[in-house]
Image (tube, rainbow, N blue to C red):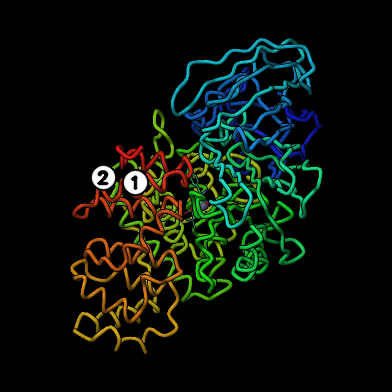
Amino acid sequence: MGRCTDHGAAGLCQEPHREGVGASYGIWTVLHFRGQSGWPGPVLLRAPVNRSGPGHWAFNFPFAVMPSSFPTPAPDPHSLAGTGPARVRHLTLALNVDFATRTLAGTATWHLTHPGAADALVLDTRDLTIEAVALGPDAEGPALAFALGPADPVLGQALRVALPPGAAAVTVRYRTAPGAAALQWLASEQTAGTEPFLFTQSQAILARTWLPCQDSPGIRFTYDATVRVPPHLLALMSAENPQRLDPSGTYRFRMAQPIPAYLMALAVGDLAFAPLSPRTGIYAEPATLPAATHEFADLEKMVAAAEQLYGPYRWERYDLLVLPPSFPFGGMENPRLTFVTPTILAGDRSLTSLIAHELAHSWSGNLVTNATWDDFWLNEGFTVYFERRIMEQLYGRPYADMLQVLGRAALRHAIAEIGPASPDTHLRLHLAGRDPDEGLTEIAYEKGCALLLALEARVGRPRLDAFIKEYFARFSFRAMDTATFLAHLRAELLDAVPGLEAGLQLADWVEGPGLPAAAVPVASARFAAVDAVLARYAAGTAPAALSPATAGWSSHEWVHFLNALPATLAAADLSALDAAFRFTASGNAEMLVAWFAHTLRAGYGAADAALEKFLRHVGRRKFIVPLYRALLATPGGPARARRIYSAARPNYHAVATSTLDALLPQAT
Ligand code: BES
Ligand code: ZN
């Protein structure tokens, strides 16, 4: 009987598996060990199968070892630490949050997986000031020699710490830069209240701008943290969270499940909590909390539906944090505490599929994690499919069908924009040497979901669901790369049916461009009704006369309507539509953005003030980038875009400004 290489347990170790990926095939178990010196690449072990979810087979080598036909997972091209000799397993973080200097300062103690096994620890950093490195669990230990490698604008700098024999923990004393890319420091005017606000956005490779860490999605660790903030402010993390203010201003956190660095998160602000069910609730600024509790009233139902579909929720609580409007994404699946944009507070619960999406990441992404950003579709494609299954469970098939049709339209748009022959439209990406941010497009989401829909059509829902549920259970708390996933898919689902893989055109999805012919069409009965209204409008019916048919439409029907309106409408046509349907005054951000595309193109000036207000207020990149693009394409647009951007830029997170600075170079 062997011993666990991570935890020392004899036999089958029940601790979460920290590194590499393992998959079982009959009596063969394939284990990949990544970057561990002294280990072979992937090995096939003739060992009993572990189908029990967390845990991995513990061994040292009484077994027969033979080379496997499975490829070695590629090393992560976006981590300078990922290939270093030592691995982290647990973090103890102690940070002071200083709004005056816009810095985080403190210590990060890294506990290592194989004490004494390596002579150096390599961590990713970017724009951090490293003040000292000490041996052991606190800053008082003996000083260790360290060096920062050359600075790369995207990857940052490797921090290499020399380890004496037997070293089990290393403490780094550091501070962040005021412009740290993961952090957004908001003045009180940029919030709904009267206090400043701070939040982090670590995905994809920004964790290293606020924490020296092994910033690769294939490397997991547990953590505890102590965070000191000004009085009256609450601190929250992707961890066990407080539900009320502590007058001391010191908060303690614990994340007992191992997570990759991109899921590290911190938010500090004037925040209040409202419970929704024993295990769910909402944090928001006090002014926003009532609207948020109304909007997300079905949160517990969503968690229950997700569990019913694909197995137990493994993170205990599920809470939402509603951020100020500058949050650069719709949502971010920080474990136990999804971060969301307030732009989904539409008042009518019409945009909550975004919550289903972030919740679904609690399985696809947070339990089974893309090994590198080249495998991003494994996170997002499964999550989009799962999101729509949750929505179907709660609101019915016709509702979910609308989401599928909008998603497919977004996919076609993305393929056209990226270029139908571009390798960036393959599911498996090749992002080495580039900023991963550039390659993480709609393709992973909607082409990934389309592949699962094509699979569903061929094997049937019961078999696909059983496959997905078992996949999440078997690979929980592990990294998954595309090649291992494909091998697993073949072994579990495809190989049993002759011709299935060929009919599915699996290789074309993964390594080929565009949308393969094997994709199944999606259709929506509710959108067919919208199309009938559009046909009447095209045939000359006045907008005001359409309204009986549009009564009861959700924002999805309206977005479909707006997207399908001809691009030839004149300002006078838009004026009539606006008079009938009050688009410019809409409180629904998705509708507004679809509407502004027309108003800008047609020069319908009555919407200009609303557009400018939107751009100054909202920092969600998915909305503002297309709006600035559309603005740039109008007569006099470049000057106007630059004027609005220079006023709005201080309200945007670095994730958004890095894209917009390239689009609007003169404004910075
Ligand atoms: N994990 C993503 C956000 C992300 C991706 C951040 C890549 C940084 C790099 C999150 O789950 C997401 O997909 N958010 C979407 C919403 C979703 C409904 C498509 C967004 O923010 O628009
Ligand atoms: Zn996502």
Q: In this view, does 312 lie to the left or right of 468?
A: right
Q: Distance between the residues labelled 2 and 1?
A: 7 Å
Tag shown at residue 51: none
**Residue at the spot 57% in from the left edge and 62% down from the top edge:** 356
Residue 499 visible (yes or no): no
For the image, the number of numbered tags is: 2
Residue 9: where, in percent of width, then height? 81, 32
Rendered view: 541 above or below 144: below
**Amino acid under disc 2:** Ala
**Residue at the spot 51% in from the left edge and 63% down from the top edge:** 344
Residue assigned mark 1: 425
Where is the N terminus found, in terms of image quarters?
Answer: top right
Residue assigned mark 2: 421
Residue 180: where, in percent of width, then height? 53, 33
Rendered view: 265 above or below 618: above
Residue 92 or residue 189, whichever sits in front: 189
Rendered view: 133 above or below 566: above
User: Disc 2 vs disc 1: Cβ atoms closer than 8 Å?
Assistant: yes
Q: In this view, does 392 lie to the left or right of 229?
A: left
- Mark 1 sits near ligand 1, with its Cβ under 8 Å away: no
